[in-house]
Amino acid sequence: MQPTHPEDVALSLGKASAVYFSNPSAYCDNIRIAAEEVLNSLGVPERSDGNGARLSFKHRIDRLPVERKRANVLFDALRWLGNHGGHAGGGITKEQALEAFEIMELLLEEVFSNRRRELRELAIAINNAKGPKHKLLRIIAITGQDDLGLILLKACQAYVRETTV
């Protein structure tokens, strides 16, 4: 298995986008390919351990690491849309192709973004401060440290980084 990087997924998404208006079925087929590349980036094998046979997209989805199982439903939806797009008579509409795009967008956020975790940490810091966050309280919330010396050291390091940029 060749390792895939988010850039490789983006390239595949670019190919899909090029045919959105002219061929929504091909768009969904390409989105499916991009979703398989996301599996590659997560280290999900393409081939069976035993006989080296190529695993189906479904079997690869089933092999997602436990911490990524929430993404199964997203991968499955893209698999179904890609299947219909890849076969003659699939008849994918532009609206259905847009749905594939929206699902892929959520999948990419789920896999490659820390946004949800960072916002959850921010909410915890605000709740702990019982109001607007203070940098020191945010450091405590994020690091889990309660050693005042270590907290102050981290706060000073963060301040130096911010002021020297």
Image (cartoon, rainbow, N blue to C red):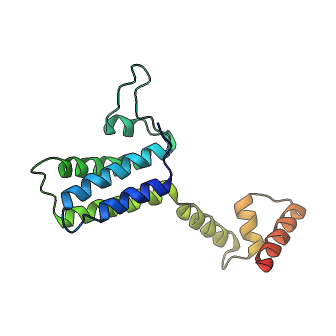
Residue at 13% from the left image edge and 52% from the top image edge: 90
Q: Does the rendering let one see residue 70?
A: no
The furthest residue to the left:
89
- Residue in front for this viewpoint, 111 or 128: 111
Is residue 23 rendered to the left or right of residue 164? left
150 w.r.t. 158: above or below? above
Where's the C terminus, which quadrant? bottom right
- Residue 4 location in percent, x, y? 48, 47
- Residue 75 location in percent, x, y? 35, 48
Residue at 64% from the left image edge and 70% from the top image edge: 127
Is residue 3 rendered to the left or right of residue 118? left
Quadrant position of residue 164: bottom right
- Residue in front for this viewpoint, 55 or 76: 55
- Residue 10 location in percent, x, y? 43, 59
Residue at 35% from the left image edge and 30% from the top image edge: 54
Quadrant position of residue 105: bottom left
